[in-house]
Image (spheres, rainbow, N blue to C red):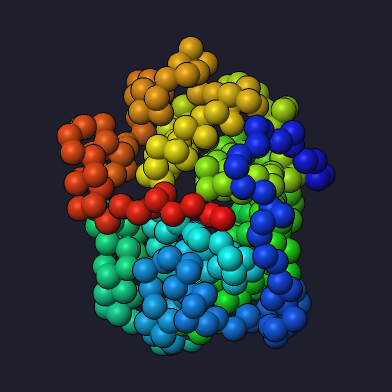
Amino acid sequence: MTELIAKPRPTPNTMGQFVRRDVLRGGEQITGNIWRLPLSDSVIERANVGVKRGELPEGYALAGGAARNCLEALVHPDVTIPSPRDVDLAYWGKSDGFDGRVADELARRFSPRDFAYGHGVGVIGGLAEYMNNRDFTINQVLSTGDAIYATTQAVRDMEQYRIRPTVFEHGRDYPLGDKLALKAVRLLAEYRAGGVEEADIYGIDLRRRHNDIRDFWHALILDKALELGDDVAREYLRLLGTYDMHPAPSLWRRQPLDVYKEVLRHTDFAPSAAVEEMLKGGDRERRLRAMGLMGKTAAKRG
């Protein structure tokens, strides 16, 4: 099942302005459809993840949005990339080489907000297993101190900014869920707010989404969008309205925080620390800087 959704309104930049290069030619196919792609100092710097090349001990890697940033920086050498919402770390070295104290130190250093809430370094059983269990193909990526490990589909979809569920998600015994659909729209909003006009969602027919999505999922994904900045949150809600998935249709043109407050009235979701600060008001810039969130959306792709 692969269906392309209708494109929302254009944004200033176009994919024609982006330089693409076939990074697989310079990589090594290590197993099946997984590649090892060399990582240079310039790529890791442009990835804007706050981790320098060689800083991670052997066996540790960047995962999630941070790894996705590294892949984007490698595939699109002319793009300026905003820093990720957070830095996810994973350990996939030898089983007897994992040291909990080292892991906690790394998590405290690179992911202080997540670590404060009990989220440390994830442990990966195997590279192939990890790749096969991702939600979107562009998340089938890990970045170590000197290389990026990614699937063929991750590279090809990142070349075109395609947000596509993996075979793993399509192979489940139930339809693609609401949480995955909302996350896909949030990823699309990130790229669109950054000026990537050609970003699109594949494999999820958003026009068939029902309007009874749980308020908890709406609160969770809108919370993450708000952490990324007002521009991302506004674009996210605009896209949801376009696909008839808006969490509060009566607040169609209201500010993201207003919509968020309305959604919170109908669920017991606990706001993240960053969004909690936004709800309290005050000097937003000072508060975000204190939490290490400044600059999240200051840079634009293009």
User: On screen, 149 above or below 176?
Assistant: below
Q: Nearer the viewer, residue 148 or 179?
A: 148
User: On screen, 53 above or below 288?
Assistant: below
Residue at horizontal 27 percent and vertical 36 percent from the top: 278
Farthest-out residue, top: 250
Q: Quadrant of residue 258?
A: top left
Left or right, 206 with respect to 81, comes to right
Q: Quadrant of the C terminus?
A: bottom right
Please indicate, yes or no, whether residue 123 appears anywhere in the rendered image.
no
Q: Position of residue 197 (x, y in %)?
A: 65, 45
Left or right, 8 with respect to 89, comes to right
Total labels drawn: 0
Q: Nearer the viewer, residue 7 or 203?
A: 7
Q: Position of residue 103 (x, y in %)?
A: 33, 75
Q: Quadrant of residue 108?
A: bottom left
Residue at horizontal 49 percent and vertical 78 percent from the top: 42
Please indicate, yes or no, whether residue 89 appears anywhere in the rendered image.
yes
User: On screen, 166 above or below 21?
Assistant: above
Q: Nearer the viewer, residue 267 or 69?
A: 69
Q: Position of residue 63 (x, y in %)?
A: 49, 66
Residue at horizontal 52 percent and vertical 42 percent from the top: 193
Q: Quadrant of the N terminus?
A: top right
Q: Nearer the viewer, residue 119 or 40?
A: 40
User: On screen, 42 above or below 196?
Assistant: below
Residue at horizontal 44 percent and vertical 73 percent from the top: 45
Q: Position of residue 299 (x, y in %)?
A: 44, 54
